[in-house]
Amino acid sequence: MTTSKLLSVLFLLLLKAISVTCRSDSNGFTLGIRDSLMVAHSFHDHPSFGPAGGMHGATYTCDVDFSTNELHPELNWVIDIGQASTILAAVLSKYNLKNLDEVFPNGEMTTTEFMCHRIHQDICEQLKKEGIDFDGSICVKLWESHKAWASYRGLVATKEG
């Protein structure tokens, strides 16, 4: 295979990958932010989790995408990046350097999927508490490693009326 043919094939594969990430059912504009957290937790020795059933640590990279169909009419942004970053830091501080078995003392299985949903809920509550208007979707993605992640996406409407 010639170099130009190989480059063409790679380009087509890249285009296919981009079209998968930019699905047509997603909102038009997205602002993404990133932070990280370190936790300890267990799965209460449940046999389905194997060695991870016992107490262990996890270091997560947390990506949050704020998506909306319309930019702010005056400011031309999805959401203020500074406010979004501050909210994420505040939410993650509830869990960072903590034992999740103590944060969730009722035996919850604090899987990565569970934590994505919980962080999403916390972000929504914080947006409302701070009176930040946002109408769109938020996707929380927790990376366990460069090979594994989980995410949760949900609609959000904090605007009055």
Image: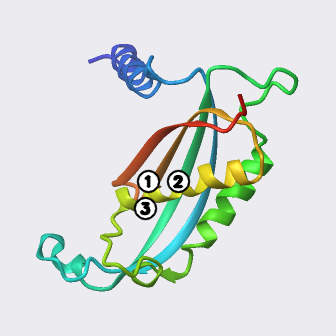
Q: Is 111 placed left or right of 124 in the picture? A: left
Separation (CA) of disc 2 from disc 3: 10 Å
| Other-residue count near label 3 (Cα within 10 Å), few / some / many at <14 / 14–19 / ≥20 | many
Left or right of 100: which side holds 88? right
For the point 62% across and 20% down, the residue is 69
Element at label 1? helix
Which residue is disc 2 drawn over? 121
Camera-side mark, 2 or 3: 2
Residue occupying image coordinates x 65% and y 57%: 88
Q: Residue furthest left?
A: 47
Three-letter residue code for mark 3: Met
- Report the residue marked by disc 3: 115
**Callouts 1 and 3 close, C-beta under 8 Å:** yes
SS at mark 2 in the image = helix
Q: Quadrant of residue 113?
A: bottom left
Determine whether 37 is above or below 70 in the image: below
- The residue shown at (37%, 16%) is 12
Q: CA distance from mark 1 to mark 3?
A: 5 Å
Instruction: Tell me: residue 117, above or below residue 65.
Output: below
Position of residue 6 in the picture relative to residue 44 (left or right): right
**In which quadrant will I find the C terminus?**
top right
Query: Residue placed at 37% from the left, 51% from the top?
Result: 150
What's the mark number on residue 117? Answer: 1
Compared with residue 37, is residue 107 higher up or lower down, i.e. above or below? Answer: below
**Quadrant assignment for the N terminus:** top left
Q: Secondary structure at mark 3?
A: helix
The reply to whether dot 2 and dot 3 touch (C-beta < 8 Å) is: no
Residue type, numbered disc 2: Gln
Q: Looking at the image, do the residues carrying marks 1 and 2 touch, with CB atoms under 8 Å apart?
A: yes
Label 1 environment density (alpha carbons within 10 Å; few <14, some 14–19, many ≥20): some
